[in-house]
Image (cartoon, grey):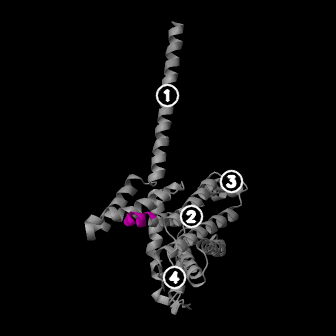
Amino acid sequence: MAYLTALFEISGLNILLALSVFATLMVGQFSLAQVGFWSIGAFVSAMLTTMYGFPLFPALMISGVLCAIIGIALGYPCLRIKGIYLTLATVAFAEVVRVFFSNLHHQVEIDGRMVGPAGALGFRGVEVIAAWPEIYAVVIVVIGMFFWIERSRIGLSANAIREDETAAAAMGINVVLVKVSMFAFGAAVAGIGGGLYATFSSFVLASNFSFHLALISIFYVAVGGMYRFYGPIVGAVLLTSLPEVFRFAADYRMILYGVVVLVVVAVFPRGIVDEILFRLAERRERMRVRNAESQSSAGHTTVVRNES
């Protein structure tokens, strides 16, 4: 039971990471900076709770606000670059953050032992105060915010910018404001998720927040779907569970994991959720056309009979 609970908790953390990536994709920005914000949230929350005695949720709020401010500062210059150059800039930011925390030494004495970040050795002994109730309380709140955003003017503006930025600007949408706002929102979600990760795992190491984690976060969105907020949720849960499902394969489980991901991408090129919705819409459209043709044919037959 403890094993399933741990898998449930890790899935919740990965959902937050996936949604933080999705927030920037809503405005067409492909960012790998979320792992950097995740790292900031993890270290800041760990220091606030373990070294300075902050309760969990105030520490998470501070981490989220700090990441949002940094996201705004990073978002404005990133508006000037697009495509692969934006991706490279956000990767560089994540690497700067990782190197910073790899060299951060800041410890205080608590109960006769030194506690705090110790450079490359990481931050050991983080107070464990987050479990599945706290994790999923945050997940529910974040999902509720995405649910509201998708149905609000902000969501409609974000979709318009993603489809055609020039046309959106011509319609009077403040492209800069919407882009920076979603970038900051994604940063805040990542910061809060990182804080939960630190206070759940008890150990934070800067090298864990590497380019590999950034790629995994993109996989969650690509596999689940990039046009509905529940797509990344499906992708995060699926890709978190697969390695455990294939544990029977021992050393070959990651090979099976890769094969399944390739098959899913081939069968669902738009992502699982978006592809299913697209196919259902196509099917409804075909049925509508077929019904219209049947009604037209029936009406034509009735007219012919009346003329006869």
| Residue linked to disc 4 | 98
Observer-nearest of 54 and 224: 54
Q: Position of residue 231 (x, y in %)?
A: 49, 55
Residue at left 52%, top 93%? 112
User: Tag 3's secondary structure?
Assistant: helix
Residue 7 belongs to the span the image colors magenta: yes
| Residue linked to disc 1 | 291
C-alpha separation, residue under disc 2 versus residue under disc 3 = 24 Å
- Amino acid at pointer 4: Arg
- Amino acid at pointer 1: Asn
Give the mark nearest the N terminus, 1 or 3.
3
Residue 125, placed above or below residue 169? below
Give the mark nearest the N terminus, 2 or 3.
2
Residue at left 48%, top 64%? 12
| Residue linked to disc 3 | 153
- Amino acid at pointer 3: Arg
User: Tag 4's secondary structure?
Assistant: helix
Residue at left 57%, top 77%? 45
Mark 2 and mark 3 in contact? Answer it, CB < 8 Å: no
User: Tag 1's secondary structure?
Assistant: helix
C-alpha separation, residue under disc 1 versus residue under disc 3 = 35 Å
From which residue to which does the magenta span run? 1-8
| Residue linked to disc 2 | 138
To which quarter of the image does residue 63 belong? bottom right
Mark 2 and mark 1 in contact? Answer it, CB < 8 Å: no
- Amino acid at pointer 2: Val
Residue 42 belongs to the span the image colors magenta: no
To which quarter of the image does residue 144 belong? bottom right
User: Tag 2's secondary structure?
Assistant: helix
The quadrant of the rendering that contains the N terminus is: bottom left
Residue 110, placed above or below residue 64? below
Give the mark nearest the N terminus, 4 or 2.
4
